[in-house]
Amino acid sequence: MARCDRRNVGYTAHTTTAAAHQRLMFTVLRFPGLVALACTFNTVQAAPVTYEVHYRAEVHPDTGRIHMELQLSGEQLPRQLEFGIDPHRHKSFAATGRIAVTDKLITWEPQAPASRLSYDFIVNHERSSGSFDALLNKDWALFRADDMVPRVSVTARRKLRSHATLEFILPPGWTAATAYPTAAGEQHLLISDPQRHFDRPVGWMLLGKLGKRSEIIAGVQTIVAAPAGDSARRQDILSFLNWNLPHLAGIFPTLPQRLLVTTAGDPMWRGGLSGPASLFIHSGRPLVSENRTSTLLHELVHVAMGIRGDEESDWIVEGLAEYYSIETLRRSGGIGQQRYDEAMRRLGEWARRTPNLFKASSSGATTARAVMVFKAADAEIRHLTGGRASLDDVARALAAQHEEVTLELLQTQAQKVAGQPLKSLEREALQNMRTER
């Protein structure tokens, strides 16, 4: 229950004239009930109105689909929900209330006290390489909940808030591994996003006949899950995280309270992909590659920071992830200084293959070049502050904002930390960068 603090009344009085202050204090002393009544009225006025959102996901391995039902209930419901869909993966829409369906948009107007929307989600998604970044077979399913429940724009009264749960209807012998806490049983999840008024499940999810390992590491409930019988080294991953996650948490206090690491072999894509509070890594990927980089740590930095770049700034996002994957290994003792220096030397050679950082998508040589930028920026910050600050402070500030990152925002945060603009982050310097030979 919200409290009414009479100190707030006193604070308001200080913004008035002395005479008005005396009249107000007289009222408080003689009629305290009026103040309590006013506070109660304000509390009631400010209290949010909650409605229930229940997602029901019924998995059908024989058809490769998950049948979704979205049920809304409450005295007040949103006026309209718009879902941006993939017409190849979201099909067979039906609803109570008014619904309009186009190729890429579903517009739904639910009606109180209860409304229901249903559709089929086709899980399998094949990449150009012929591998999959989402798959449903007879034994397991691995996908991102962001795809299962498309991004939604909600039109509603400002005070309306959702309380959401997700229920899985699974084949016999199947269980679920997600980053969400259970609400009532392992297959009933509590979906909560304090930053949004409408809660929607996001992140990686693994369903099926599974093997799981779980441990609290640096205050993070860490779960490693893979299909039963897969070659995934769950305990190796958990041990690796025991060494490295505390160091990453020291840089990024924005790490989630629950972290899910999913892993599976072919025909899944042979790389790593991050999501909110979760990630996927192919079970054939090494924890540390021969070039001393780590796909697992790279994706963990993405999870910890939760940032995205604008049309020319993906190099910032990918460069920070790669820089801190190597830096975390060095700090944890996973690699020594000599190996670290060798990794940076090789990245510097690779960086020479790209003439430009400012691309819509960063990979390979562009990311290597970005690592060199951040190494130089870290050295410049340490020099300007006499070692009192570092790139850690900049990365931590970017992660705390949790928003789209631009070069201008990076420069601003770096200037706040260093006390003056960084030469290593000037646009002209980045466009004409030369790496040391």
Image (spheres, rainbow, N blue to C red):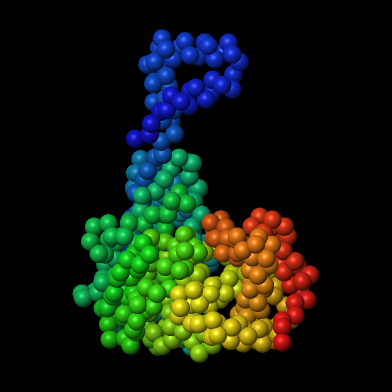
Measured as percent of width and height from the top left, residue 74 is found at 34, 44
Task: From this view, report whether residue 54 is shown above or below residue 1.
Answer: below
Q: Position of residue 227 (x, y in %)?
A: 31, 81
**Picture quadrant of residue 385:** bottom right
**Residue drawn at (72%, 57%), measured in percent from left and top?**
420
Residue appearing at x 55%, y 60% in the figure:
396
Give me the residue at 31% from left, 80% from top. Answer: 235
Name of the residue lying farthest toward the left: 172
Residue at position x 48%, y 14% in the image: 25
Between residue 421 and residue 141, name the one nearer to us. Answer: 421
Question: Is 367 situated left or right of 150 in this image?
Answer: right
Q: Residue furthest bottom?
A: 290
- Placement of 33 over or under 233, stated as above or below: above
Image-quadrant location for residue 58:
bottom left
Instruction: Looking at the picture, tell me which residue is in the foreground, 371 or 160.
Output: 371
Q: Quadrant of the C terminus?
A: bottom right
